[in-house]
Amino acid sequence: MKKTRMATGLLQSLKEANAIERGELKGRETTRKLSRPAPKWSKTAIKKLREEMFEMSQPVFASLLNVKPATVRAWEQGQRTPDGAAARLLEILSNDVDIANELAS
């Protein structure tokens, strides 16, 4: 198999793009729906999730989420709010209590 240089591949791609623009080639189009953002979590919602749904202490809940206990404490005191993956994980856990048992085992 002959290796091509990156520049050759880029030029070929550019030629194909021009041919698609002129209608000489049919291009491929992919549309993907983006997921909605994770919900915002209030300090009371996090504490309620931890205490009422999971009946866990802060250290145990932190272990489940793979964060430090200080992080959970900061969330519950309103000093910080979970964002990104942590917010999405809290959403998933709040919708499926049984998943916590699966993760803990």
Image: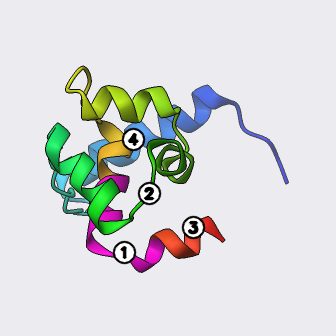
Res 38 visible: no
Distance, label 4 to label 3, CA atoms, is 50 Å
Q: Which label was assigned to residue 56?
A: 2
Vertical placement of 33 versus 8: above or below? below
Q: Which residue is mark 3?
A: 103
Labels 4 and 2: the sequence-earlier one: 4
Q: Position of residue 37 (x, y in %)?
A: 17, 48
Q: Is residue 6 left or right of residue 61?
A: right
For the C terminus, give its image quadrant: bottom right
Magenta span dominant secondary structure: helix
Q: Nearer the viewer, mark 3 or mark 2?
A: 2
Q: Residue furthest bottom?
A: 98
Q: Nearer the viewer, mark 1 or mark 4?
A: 1
Q: Residue furthest right?
A: 1
Q: Position of residue 60 (x, y in %)?
A: 53, 50
Q: Of 49 and 102, which appears nearest the observer?
A: 49
Q: Which label was assigned to residue 15?
A: 4
* Segment tinted magenta in the rendering: 89-99
Q: Which residue is mark 1?
A: 97
Distance, label 3 to label 2, CA atoms, is 14 Å
Q: Which label was assigned to residue 24?
A: none
How crowded is the residue under tag 3: few (<14 C-alpha within 10 Å), some, or many (20+)?
A: few
Label 2 amino acid? Met
Labels 1 and 3: the sequence-earlier one: 1
- Where residue 1 sits, quadrant-wise, is bottom right
Q: Is residue 72 left or right of residue 31?
A: right
Labels 1 and 4: the sequence-earlier one: 4
Distance, label 1 to label 3, CA atoms, is 11 Å
